[in-house]
Image (cartoon, coloured by chain):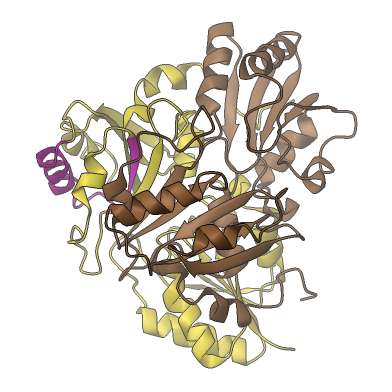
Chain colours: A yellow, B brown
């Protein structure tokens, strides 16, 4: 049979947030190359016979180099395997999909993307909040706090970040949040702008802190160091505590 | 039993892009209040006994007013029903979730959000492209082309839109794209910036056009008028045609 590569989004953590298509891909896989942020509950949904290979670690670049991942992925597909490249969130959003698709293209290996719920969407659902609002959150933007070198990216458009009518999501913010917040404030963002940091959104160990953006860098240190963190800034997160208090028990509760 | 409201993301169109949690919500529903962009294939996955009520029409504001939707939703939940408010894409992204959650809060009705794959993610997977890139697409932003009055929103931050290192997604762009593109170009976006418009992404009738942003407004007129359209602007969409040519046949093909 012809091999192929499926770049599959594992979603934010809760296995119930997989798409039906991702579930099908996991159940058709011969080999699964997964990042360490992918949860055990998601991996348990895969075909029992599938070989599982961990290829990434949390937040500090891959433990297996990107070149090695590409080579492994392509060589397995060339042997005729269905290779699932399983990434937390959505492969198309801060998932390095371009690098892996280029490797497939260069090798003549067919590939497809299966989207996933990205961490920001997981956080919004977990906290019961909308990321946009017709009156006060009309633009939604995603940035990474983590450049190729692990530092705050040089190219951030600070005027876009300082916009009071935007909701800003920072992926992988932990090591650079203090500098990010300082630059945003220098660029005109009000220090009182509501913000929050959420760790392990949609997972059983989920925890969050809420504070004005000026105070958030201190508060983030309260979150367990091992958990993946996301920061959300903007009017959209004002009053998150009150909202959480009236959230439905859980969709999973008996109907 | 206590009633409740579940704001559920139906995803971009392909029923396989529902999450497992959304499927479970549809199968626990007593009543489903759905927008017209929700596809027949998604509705078919609902519990047979569930009452289905269409409450929205395409692109020009609801045919049932937001106040009437809120009232219907809350009164059904108060009668003890499990009410699924089913929205295309993700309720937390341009889904007016805040207005409906506020109605639930005011009425003391428990609610939860079940996220969905938003149209931009559906488009990215359908076209085999990444919305971010470590080198040339470091910020991803979603805006709407459609204000409360159906016009181009007044508050758009044009400097954020003109940033050459961003990927910009415009939701509901059809009637305002010419003006949007003109303002973006005046604000410094290069007219040669790659762009595309995709209609009915992930649905069987999906079709797209690709052009430089300066030329896209003319090309969008080639898309069937009845289909929902999304515009993507930025280096991330350069060479989409080539990418599409080597896409895997389909995840749904026999394994």
In reply to whether residue B182 is colored magenta, the answer given is no
Judged left or right of residue A249, residue B46 is: right
Q: Is residue A168 above or below residue B131?
A: above
Task: Say which of B62 and B45 sits in front.
Answer: B62
Q: Is residue B183 above or below residue B115?
A: below
Residue A209 in the image: x percent, y percent? 30, 31
Q: Is residue A65 above or below residue A143?
A: below
In reply to whether residue A186 is colored magenta, the answer given is yes
Judged left or right of residue A150, residue A8 is: right
Q: What residue is rendered at 56% in x and 77% in y?
A: B241
Task: Say which of B223 and B124 sits in front.
Answer: B223
Which quadrant, please, contains the N terminus of chain B? top right
Residue A228 appears in the rendering: no
Residue A252 in the image: x percent, y percent? 65, 32
Using the rendered view, name the quadrant where residue A29 is placed: bottom right
Residue A52 in the image: x percent, y percent? 56, 72
Which quadrant, please, contains the C terminus of chain B? bottom right
Magenta segment: A166-188
Residue B82 appears in the rendering: yes
Q: What residue is rendered at 36% in x and 28% in y?
A: A237
Judged left or right of residue B106, residue A214 is: left
Residue B43 in the image: x percent, y percent? 80, 40
């Amino acid at each position: 049979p012809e091999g192929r590569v499926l770049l599959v989004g594992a979603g934010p953590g809760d296995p119930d947030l997989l798409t039906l298509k991702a579930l099908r891909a996991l159940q058709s896989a011969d080999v699964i190359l997964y990042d360490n942020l992918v949860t055990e509950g998601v991996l348990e949904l895969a075909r029992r016979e599938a070989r599982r290979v961990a290829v990434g670690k949390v937040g500090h670049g891959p433990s297996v180099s990107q070149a090695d991942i590409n080579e492994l992925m392509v060589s397995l597909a060339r042997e005729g395997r269905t290779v699932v490249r399983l990434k937390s969130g959505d492969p198309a959003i801060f998932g390095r999909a371009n690098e892996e698709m280029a490797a497939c293209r260069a090798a003549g290996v067919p590939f497809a993307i299966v989207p996933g719920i990205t961490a920001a969407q997981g956080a919004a659902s977990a906290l019961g909040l909308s990321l946009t609002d017709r009156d006060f959150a009309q633009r939604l933007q995603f940035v990474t706090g983590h450049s190729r070198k692990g530092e705050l990216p040089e190219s951030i458009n600070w005027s876009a970040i300082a916009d009071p009518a935007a909701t800003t999501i920072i992926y992988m913010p932990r090591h650079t949040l203090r500098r990010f917040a300082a630059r945003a404030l220098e660029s005109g963002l009000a220090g009182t702008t509501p913000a929050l940091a959420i760790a392990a959104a949609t997972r059983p160990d989920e925890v969050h802190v809420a504070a004005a953006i000026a105070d958030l860098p201190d508060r983030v240190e309260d979150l367990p160091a091992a958990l993946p963190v996301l920061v959300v800034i903007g009017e959209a997160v004002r009053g998150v505590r009150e909202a959480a208090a009236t959230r439905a028990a859980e969709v999973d509760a008996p109907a």
